[in-house]
Amino acid sequence: MVVLGMTGVLAEVNLAFAGLQQALRPLMKLAKALPPRQQSALLNAFGLGEEAAEPPDVWLVALATLTLLTESATHKPILLVVDDAQWLDEATRDVLSFVSRRLSADSIVLLLALREGFSLPFGLLDIRAPDLSGKLRDRFLKEAAGNPLALVELPHNLRTEDDGEAPWLPLTERLERTFSSRLSGLPGATQMLLNVAAENDGTSLHEILRAGEVLLAQNIGVDALAPAASAQLIDLDAMQVRFRHPLVRSAIHRTADVATRQKVHSALAAVIEDQDRRLWHRAAATVGPDDDLAAELDLMASRAQSRGANTMAMEVLQIAAKLSSTAKARRERFLQAAEIATDLGRPGLLEHLLREAEVEPSCQATSGFNPVAT
């Protein structure tokens, strides 16, 4: 294997192609075999061409770089390592973006590292999934929290605008394995508390410990979470439990079976004092129709609307609809949610809700829609 390396340097961030020159130096003996225009552009980029030459075309430099890498990779695999990527010069970033979009069957691996607190210096997510909606792109960036594997894998299963509102992002098997690998070695009580923390809609240490006591029927101290903190899965203080990476929480949710999730939500509903949050967990713990709970959720949706939380109201109405025992009540609640979706300008979700209500989307007008009266 051939290892090529470049390191971003703050003092060289304004020097075009400074980073690229570091990496390609061992391959420059092959540049003589490049097509003339690519060769000229690459040599000019590194100050090795004719003095009177025009500034190099970045596209030609990128093409020359790709040609050098792919030709070299036919003899030995290549690992291209980029350290302190946040300080690469713009021209080098452009070349890396170009190259990374065109690596497929070639024996080339591009590995980037950057300092904590910085975002990737070029859009890896945009490279892998250029057609994402802005909402879904923002969601993926937030959930990935700078992890390159997550940026590559997350777009595999969700691509529509309304997926950005999904409570949980479906993980690929590779992501689930990566972010749950440290769970199996933890004590049983610790794993159960992590399940509680993952399903809870808050970060209160007190709530998590109390719900753990309900589930395990024993006194639980904060020391039960210490192994998870030592494994760097969570950050723990006297008041809160926070996952160190958002996808750890998603992986824990995914690896828990449905029965465990329901028990966790039931325990949380038993200890949470806030009325609306308690209702949310009661609904998540409920199997089958429950008209009384659906009616309470109707009131919760009204409270949410009164304070301008229309998205929450819409989500609550959908849950209430699924808890309804009659087709009529189910339809009315989905139509109320559809009315909110109309007000929010969410046509994709509107169509979904109308289908759930068994109303053909083609029958509704694009303006002045009154779903309850339909």
Image: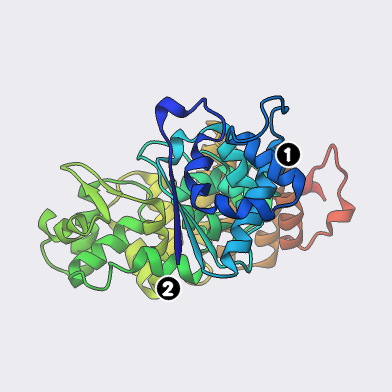
Sequence-earlier tag: 1 or 2:
2
Looking at the rendering, in which quadrant would you find the N terminus?
A: bottom left
In screen coordinates, is 336 left or right of 202? right
In screen coordinates, is 64 left or right of 276? right
Q: Amino acid at mark 2?
A: Val
> Residue at the spot x=21%, y=59% of the render?
231
Point out which mark residue 258 bears.
Answer: 2
> Residue at the spot x=42%, y=59% of the render?
250
Q: Position of residue 344 (x, y in %)?
A: 69, 38
Q: Position of residue 242 (x, y in %)?
A: 29, 47
Q: Position of residue 189 (x, y in %)?
A: 18, 68
The residue that label 1 is drawn on is 345
Q: Amino acid at mark 1?
A: Gly
User: Can you see residue 157?
Assistant: no
Q: Quadrant of residue 351?
A: bottom right
Compare residues 34 and 216 and report the one nearer the observer.
34
User: Can you see residue 19?
Assistant: yes
